[in-house]
Amino acid sequence: MTKTENNGVMEAVISLCKRRGFIFQGSEIYGGLAGTWDYGPLGAELKENIKSLWWRRFLTSRNDMCRVDAAILMNQNVWKASGHVSGFSDPLVECKKCQHRFRADQLDATNKCPDCGGSLGEVKQFNMMFQTHVGAVQDESSVSYLRPETAQGMFVNFKNILDSLHPRLPFGMAQIGKAFRNEIAPRDFLFRAREFEQMEIEYFIRPPKDENDREWEKVFAHFVSEVKAFTSDVGLNPEKVHELEVSDGERAHYSKRTIDFEFDFPFGRNELYGLAYRTDFDLKQHSEFSKADLSYYDEETKERFTPHCIEPSFGLDRTVLAVLTDAYTEDELGGEKRIYLKLSPSVAPFKVAVFPLLRNKPQLVEKAQQIFKSIKKEIPATAFDDNGNIGKRYRRQDEIGTPFCVTIDFDTIEKNAGVTVRDRDTGKQERVTEAELVEFFKKKF
Ligand code: GAP
């Protein structure tokens, strides 16, 4: 990764994110709010690029998926049916001395408080859903929750999709949106947050005819390879992505098979995404609790049944963290130490930055503006930068991961000698004519 030790990488990435406007602590000027993060201009661009790649792979490049955008607040019965009210909890333990609270499953066997060494109390189950009340009356009937997963917004709209789009099986619903979990111990920057974004798919298939019908495994295998393909779309090093077959006792209550896709984060290997075979659990539960008919009628076979579901679930913020930590690089260029983000052009906030060699020479600035506008027309994620000297601009663009910098100098104007294009990773410069510039970048991307 770098010459820096792994733990140093997390600190270095967090500091770069703040310094360069990627990500800030939530409510920072008030001392922050644990487990919340605000995306600044560059982080928001990076996140949008990841979302676009996801939509492209899972929605627009196929014809069996539809997009939904459900409400964050849902009827409390949704969460009773899904099992979240009774079971979406983590084991909580409190120190008898300092009253600090911890997740019991993340402590060592000494049963001592990691903060003060005091003894720990009894383990209690702590429900992670954020509860609120809808409307002016605060009683049992007005309880609602901020959704802890986007998935249920799709299951409860299953009938609406059948009635309005009449899709044929197999088909999927895809959604990107916020999810909220009152994590006992938010940690590792974006990795475990209390407010985060998910990108989820509920893919509906025919139920198996019997125990020997393994058709669902083909769909499952298809999504294993699509999830892996997505990790390369965003530029993650494939050697850092691993599949983990989740054992019987470890799986969520709704899943018959789960594969976790893990990533080598600087703090260790940990879950990036999940793929679960949710069977007909959710549709059956919602049918029972809501009394709505969530079955599917197959016109060809004249059969009525409850479809089964395969769910690839992606954490967007974990993707941002994986991308940033994977891209963070320290090296030496021209005898000087430098830090840069080796981002894939597919996710880099800016693909190209254009500068005049000197900011106080109007003819250079004017020419640079003209070239900037012509590139931007074709490659919208192009920046104009005339702050500080050229060395500082290169360092800034390297740190935000811009793959190419274009400099307009006197030869551009006086000798019609084109511009210099500098490659972020090698620092090498080459001259490219103005006429060939856009084509040059398009080939590179
Ligand atoms: N609908 C299935 C579901 O929500 P999950 O494994 O609980 O499954 C899916 O969450 C993904 O959401 C995880 O793989 C992870 O990427 C992301 N995620 C979960 N909890 C998170 C948290 N507290 N902070 C950031 N991302 C989280």
Image (cartoon, helix red, strand yellow):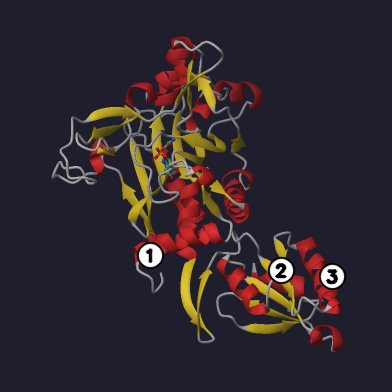
Quadrant in which ligand 1 is drawn: top left
Q: Nearer the viewer, mark 3 or mark 2?
A: 2
**Quick check: 389 left or right of 200?**
right
Q: Residue furthest left?
A: 110
Mark 1–mark 3 CB contact (< 8 Å): no
The x and y percentages for residue 104 are 23, 38
Secondary structure at badge 3 equals: helix
Q: Which mark is residue 8?
A: 1
For mark 2, what is the residue? 385
Name the kind of residue labelled 2 in the image.
Asp
The x and y percentages for residue 59 are 60, 43
For mark 3, what is the residue? 370
Give 402 or 258, whichever is nearer the viewer. Answer: 402
How many angstroms separate mark 1 from mark 3 (CA)?
A: 42 Å
**Quick check: 17 left or right of 238?**
right
2 or 1: tag closer to the N-terminus: 1
Residue at 43% from the left image edge and 13% from the top image edge = 289
Inspect this view and state whether residue 273 appears: yes
3 or 2: tag closer to the N-terminus: 3
Q: Which mark is residue 398?
A: none
Mark 2–mark 1 CB contact (< 8 Å): no
